[in-house]
Amino acid sequence: MVKEQRRCTWCGDDPLYMRYHDEEWGVPTRDRNALFEMLVLEGMQAGLSWITVLRKRRHLRAALFALAPELVVRMGSLDIARLLADPGVIRHRGKLASVSHNAARFLELDRDAEAVTTLWSFVGGAPVVNRWHDSREVPATTPAAQLMSKALKKAGFKFVGPTICYAFMQASGMVNDHLLGCFRHAACQEPDTRRQLVD
């Protein structure tokens, strides 16, 4: 009989949520497009559940030019009108407009320094490994996330509040918030951990 692996409780028993937890969440990534995509998705989540965003993720990619910053930066009013009529995306005018806006800011960040290095600098360039026993111990934000939020807002980004920034840090593996009892806690500390994009 195969012993069932223990997971963080937040992913419940939804297969898509479990795959995201097992294959992507908390796995460190320095891929610039993956970081931009996660920043977009976390902004899309504001006021919604994460599972809603995950369920729309594949369609969001298809409708939003693969969420590549060099492509979405060209989006204009006609694209926004098209997206607002598309039930497969999150139809919020402000969030959709922010994708192109934030892509421009992201590309500026990449020109001035390097977006990946800048984003990772808020955790000192290496993942912060937390040691939580219970999900109630995990904070909604941290001083590092507050600093990231302040810096991104100053750079002109939208939908980058401290809670969104902390969720972004967790998702991209800048912070390992898998519980100690979760089978992924140790795995996400390995330098060669493979990150699988889930959609």
Image (spheres, grey):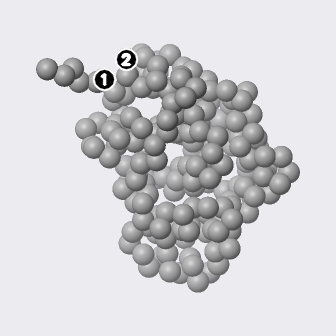
Which of the two labelled residues, at mark 2 and mark 1, occupies the earlier sequence position?
Answer: 1
The quadrant in which residue 102 appears is bottom right
Give the left or right position of residue 172, taking residue 12 as reference: right
* Residue 6, label in figure: 1
Q: Residue lying at the far bottom in this picture: please name it.
A: 78
Residue 39 can be seen, yes or no: no
CB under 8 Å between callouts 2 and 1? yes
Q: Is residue 162 left or right of residue 122?
A: left
Residue 187 x/y as whole percent: 46, 24
User: Which quarter of the picture shows residue 156?
Assistant: bottom right
Residue 145 pos. (x, y %): 65, 35
Instruction: Specify whether residue 158 is in view.
Output: yes
What amino acid is at disc 2?
Gly
Quarter placement of the N terminus: top left
Q: Please name the residue shown 35% across and 41% down the image.
A: 19
Q: Is residue 23 left or right of residue 162?
A: left
Residue on which the image places disc 2: 181
The percent position of residue 133, horizontal first and vertical second, equals 42, 16
Q: Residues within 10 Å of mark 2 (few under 14, many from 20)?
A: some
Residue 129: percent from the left, percent from the top? 57, 21
Asked where in the image residue 120 lies, by quadrant, the reply is: top right
In-front residue for pair 40/127: 127
Name the kind of residue labelled 1 in the image: Arg
SS label for mark 1:
loop
How packed is label 1: few (under 14 Cα within 10 Å), some, or many (20 or more)? Answer: few
**The furthest residue to the front:** 192
